[in-house]
Amino acid sequence: MTEGGKLLVVGPVYSGKTTLCQCLAGMPQMYVKTHTVQLVGDAIDTPGEYIENRILRHRLKVTASDARLVLFLQDASALSFHFAPGQASMFGGPVAGVVTKIDLAGEKEVGQARELLNLAGASPHFAVSLLTGEGLEGLKAFIAENLGFGTRLSTTGPRAPG
Ligand SMILES: Nc1nc2c(ncn2[C@@H]2O[C@H](COP(=O)(O)OP(=O)(O)OP(=O)(O)O)[C@@H](O)[C@H]2O)c(=O)[nH]1
Ligand SMILES: [Mg+2]
């Protein structure tokens, strides 16, 4: 197996999964709705519907057989939460949490998102803005430690196309 596919990115629709994968791969940020499981750089990107819809959730488990680390993403500015308590246990390996869009939320919302990720069994947590780059350094280091990639991640915000 190649390096690609060892990081599985899971989270609700619009939580920032594809954007994170693009950042990790050093690709320009471009909004593209994810309709099916796909490799983006070294990561496996999944559609938000897979965690939001109970009937589709089992597809995450199948996809996870290629993964060594799972990330649960939660948008700090979102009003809804889709991970069940203990959700992380559906994966055999480590699951970490990432609170995204901290540029759009206050400390209270970020804290709540962290608590909910904790309840889902995702640990440790990172709080990031994929817009400004805040918090990405720690997440990048964690991924690099666990999987040996992610070091190309820009910590200064989105890269210009080209
Ligand atoms: N302000 C802000 N916007 C963000 C951040 N992360 C992602 N976005 C924006 O949120 C929107 C959705 O991001 P995606 O990465 O496409 O979301 P996704 O989780 O892949 O969504 P699905 O493919 O529908 O499951 C895009 O317009 C991103 O630019 C962030 O940290 N801050
Ligand atoms: Mg997507």
Image (cartoon, grey):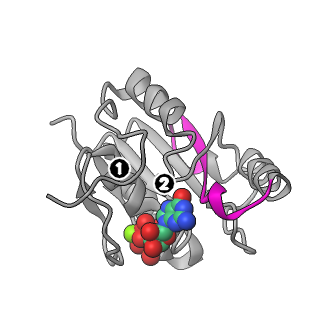
Q: Residues within 10 Å of mark 2 (few under 14, many from 20)?
A: many
Q: Report the amino acid beneath label 2.
A: Leu
**Is the residue under label 2 in contact with that under label 1 (CB below 8 Å)?**
yes
* Residue 26 picture location, percent across and down: 26, 46
- Which residue is pictured at 35% across the width and 73% down the height? 31
* Residue 135 picture location, percent across and down: 57, 39
Label 2 CB sits under 8 Å from any ligand 1 atom: yes
**How far apart in space, not on screen, are marks 1 and 2 (Cα)?**
8 Å
Image quadrant holding the C terminus, namely bottom left
Q: Report the amino acid beneath label 1.
A: Cys
Which element carries disc 1, helix, strand or loop? helix
Q: Which residue is mark 2?
A: 130
Q: Point out which mark residue 13 bears.
A: none
Residue 19 in which image quadrant: bottom left
Magenta region, residue range = 90-106
**Within the magenta stretch, is there residue 98?**
yes
Q: Which residue is mark 1?
A: 23
Which element carries disc 2, helix, strand or loop? loop
Q: In the drawing, does residue 151 fall left or right of residue 88?
A: left
For marks 1 and 2 on the same chain, the one whose residue lies earlier in the sequence: 1
